[in-house]
Amino acid sequence: MHMTRLFLSPPHLSGRERELVAEVFASNYIAPVGPMVERFEREFGARLGIPAALATGSGTAALHLALRWFGVGPGDTVVCSTLTFIASIAPAVQLGATPVFVDADEATWCMDADLLAEALKTRAAIGKLPKAVVAVDLYGQCCDYDRLLAACTPYNVPLIADAAESLGATYKGQAAGRPAAAAIYSFNGNKIVTTSGGGMLVSRDGAMVAKARFWATQARDPAPHYQHSEVGYNYRLSNVLAAIGCGQLEQLEQKVAAKRSIFEQYRNALDGLPGVTFMPEAEYGQSNRWLTVAQFDPAGTRARPEQVRLELEARNIEARPVWKPMHLQPVFRSAPVYGGAVAERIFDRGLCLPSGTAMSRADVERVAAIVRQCVGRKR
């Protein structure tokens, strides 16, 4: 019998999105920027406790603007988490910089602060300090910002939080990304809050966000005619998409609760299976559990992540491997890397299970039953 497809993390419209989009259509403000964009920026910044926010066409665009603000250009280096998606480092490469990768911490899966300190010390000794560090909040879990900042501060290297996956998570009671010099967020279709596509740059430095806003609007000088003293980008978010974002943002707490509930349901359903564990949660905060990530230890089970993925796919269920570390990507084969074994092990053993906020308990059990079949009965 055909079963409805379960996607990994599909969009879930559950609030006033349609109503707010109708307001935009009624106003005929079908354009980049506009009142709804301003509202989205204002409400987003208020939730984070950071007043300066800029809505962009993507999280990647937001990171590009932050890196440009910090002066990244040809001949520079930028340090980044190796366990991430390529968008965390692609803007730095596009600006002409060389990436340097740092391994994950076994306890959090985010950037290892000790290895970052080692990397900065080593690179300072050879006169090649990076222009910035991009630390990725992985699968909804915040990095240990305080320890990363302690490593960066002696060298005056700014820390950028790639919080694309962690909106709604917390770090020592603060919103994800808040302690960093700048933070970027994604509203891609698979994120916990979506505008179909979009992003946000935030910072306590209002001058940074103001300059980024200027660049993002084609760097148009304040003149009645079209005048440009710099070259910018067409990076602003659509007023229509911002309306979706405002509706989604109103449901953030419920979405985080749903993600965390789904994780607990998986953990309860698969508890006791030999060799199966889940991504740990750091003691310093609360993850939004954007995706539930299971690990299949070959010492405890013969089931491999790819085998489980194929079994799920055969039953119309989408699952995906953990991010392939950047230092293993062919395009970055010559890039320096500090450590690497932890990220490689997580990649080798990890599988992201369906985690959409609209999933039912029956959906979770449907996935869990197939995982149990692959692994074998409980001990």
Image (cartoon, rainbow, N blue to C red):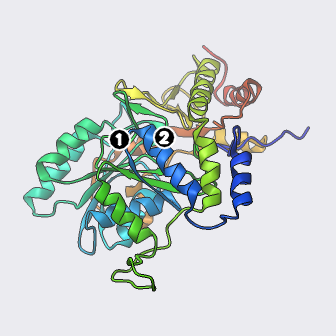
Residue 147's disc is none
Quadrant in which the C terminus appears: top right
Q: How many discs appear?
A: 2
* Residue 48 spot, x, y in % from top left: 42, 39
Q: Which residue carries the number 2 mark?
A: 167
Amino acid tagged 1: Arg
Q: Considering the numbered disc 2 on the image, is that residue within a helix, a strand or a loop?
A: loop
- The crowding category of the residue bearing disc 2, from other C-alpha atoms within 10 Å (few below 14, some 14 to 19, many at least 20), is many
Q: Considering the numbered disc 1 on the image, is that residue within a helix, a strand or a loop?
A: loop
Compared to 231, does 340 lie above or below?
A: above
Q: Which is more toward the observer, 260 or 325?
A: 260
Q: Earlier in the sequence, mark 2 or mark 1?
A: 2
* Residue 231 spot, x, y in % from top left: 38, 80
Q: Residue at x 53, y 62 (%)?
A: 57
Q: Can residue 42 be seen by looking at this rendering?
A: yes
CA–CA distance in space, label 2 to label 1: 11 Å
Q: Can residue 346 be seen by looking at this rendering?
A: no
Quadrant in which the N terminus appears: top right
Q: Residue at x 25, y 36 (%)?
A: 146
On the image, which quarter does residue 253 sit in? top right
Amino acid tagged 2: Leu
> On the picture, is 151 further left or further right than 39?
left
Q: Which residue carries the number 1 mark?
A: 178
Instruction: Name the residue at the top extreme.
Output: 379
On the image, which quarter does residue 248 sit in? top right
